[in-house]
Image (tube, rainbow, N blue to C red):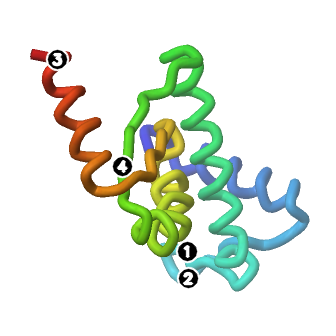
Amino acid sequence: MFLSQPTVSARIKTLESELDSVLFERQGRGIILTEKGKAFIPFADQIIRTFQQGKKQLKTGSELEEIKIGANIITSQYFIPFALPLWKMENPNLRFKFISATNDALMDKLLQKQRRET
């Protein structure tokens, strides 16, 4: 972490004071998470993810990379509504564009795109 042990200890104490909760207990030369510490992990993870997203957004500007997804009608109705939120959660810096059409129409769109790029 490139921080001295006293610095880490001081930051932990400050965090525990701010949260009014003991997050770690000492065990010999080590520490373990308390139940409150374990309960706080998802919130700490979200704080870190949000910070990283904000940092990346400032570096790259407002343009997000776009992923285009094409799916047939059945896949659009039964799979995509469940998968898309999970993909977005795992890839918050991507923008998803979704196209629902028949297999033939999707194939035509793909072939047209390939022709334009060559």
Q: Residue 31: which numbered mark, if any?
A: 1
- How much space separates mark 2 and mark 4, taking CA atoms? 54 Å
Q: Position of residue 98 (x, y in %)?
A: 47, 46
* Secondary structure under the numbered disc 3 in the rendered image: helix
* Secondary structure under the numbered disc 2 in the rendered image: strand
In the rendered image, which residue does mark 2 sit on?
A: 27
Query: In front: 16, or 71?
Result: 71
Amino acid residing under circle 2 = Gln
Q: Image quadrant of residue 42? A: bottom right
- The answer to whether mark 3 and mark 1 are in CB contact below 8 A is no
In the rendered image, which residue does mark 3 sit on?
A: 117
**Which dot, 4 or 1, sits closer to the camera?**
4
Whichever of labels 2 and 4 marks the residue nearer the N terminus, that label is 2
Q: Position of residue 118 (x, y in %)?
A: 9, 16
In the rendered image, which residue does mark 4 sit on?
A: 70
Q: Image quadrant of residue 68? A: top left
- How much space separates mark 2 and mark 3, taking CA atoms? 62 Å
Q: Position of residue 1 (x, y in %)?
A: 44, 44
- The answer to whether mark 3 and mark 4 are in CB contact below 8 A is no
Whichever of labels 2 and 3 marks the residue nearer the N terminus, that label is 2
- How much space separates mark 2 and mark 1, taking CA atoms? 5 Å
Residue at x-position 50% and y-position 43%:
4
- Residue ranking furthest to the left: 118
Amino acid residing under circle 4 = Gly
Left/right of residue 29 with respect to residue 110 in the rendered view: right
- How much space separates mark 3 and mark 1, taking CA atoms? 57 Å
Decide: few, some or many residues near mark 3? Use Cα within 10 Å; few <14, some 14-19, many ≥20: few
- The answer to whether mark 2 and mark 1 are in CB contact below 8 A is yes
